Image (cartoon, rainbow, N blue to C red):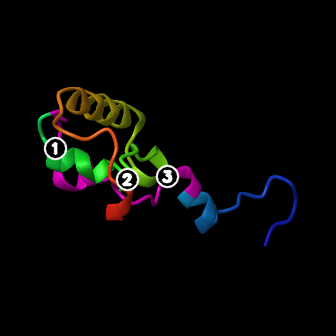
Amino acid sequence: MQRGKFVKRRPSLAAKIRAGAMRKPSYLEEHGIKFIDYKDVKLLQRFVSPAAKILPRRLTRLNQQQQRDITTAIKRARHLALMPFTTDAEAY
């Protein structure tokens, strides 16, 4: 085995996960959803917490553009009263 500072090392499993090489696909990638529609309330509810908050990217596993599109669609659906802004706290 060679020793020295120019020895090529294989990346560890943790490094691969951090780099995104082994990340789990998002819900949209799994189901082949290309277009996010504000009228599809059932899809949008998957990305909202029980307290009616929009979930962050690290939980939804969406890329930046998809997360932006989801956020815009949720806000439009809320404005048109298709989705609630808040939920009843006693129900949970």
Labelled disc at residue 77: none
Residue at the disc numbered 2: 49
Residue range of the region highlighted in magenta in the rendering: 18-38
State yes or no: residue 52 in magenta.
no
Give the residue at the far bottom of this rendering: 1
At 39% from the left and 43% from the top, the residue drawn is 54
Residue at the disc numbered 3: 20
Return the residue nearer the eye: 42 or 34.
42
Side of 13 relative to 53 (left or right): right
Q: x and y percent of residue 29 in the render? A: 25, 50
Marker count (numbered): 3
Residue at the disc numbered 1: 41
User: Relative to residue 35, is residue 4 depicted above or below?
Assistant: below
Q: Secondary structure at mark 1?
A: helix
Return the residue nearer the eye: 9 or 38.
38
Q: Which is more N-terminal, label 1 or label 3?
A: 3
At 17% from the left and 54% from the top, the residue drawn is 31
State yes or no: residue 19 in magenta.
yes
Q: x and y percent of residue 90 in the render? A: 36, 61
Q: Which is more N-terminal, label 2 or label 1?
A: 1
Side of 65 relative to 16 (left or right): left
At 71% from the left and 57% from the top, the residue drawn is 8
Between label 3 and label 2, give the one nearer the viewer. Answer: 2
Q: Which is more N-terminal, label 2 or label 3?
A: 3
Q: Amino acid at mark 3?
A: Gly
Q: Amino acid at mark 2?
A: Ser
Side of 85 relative to 7 (left or right): left
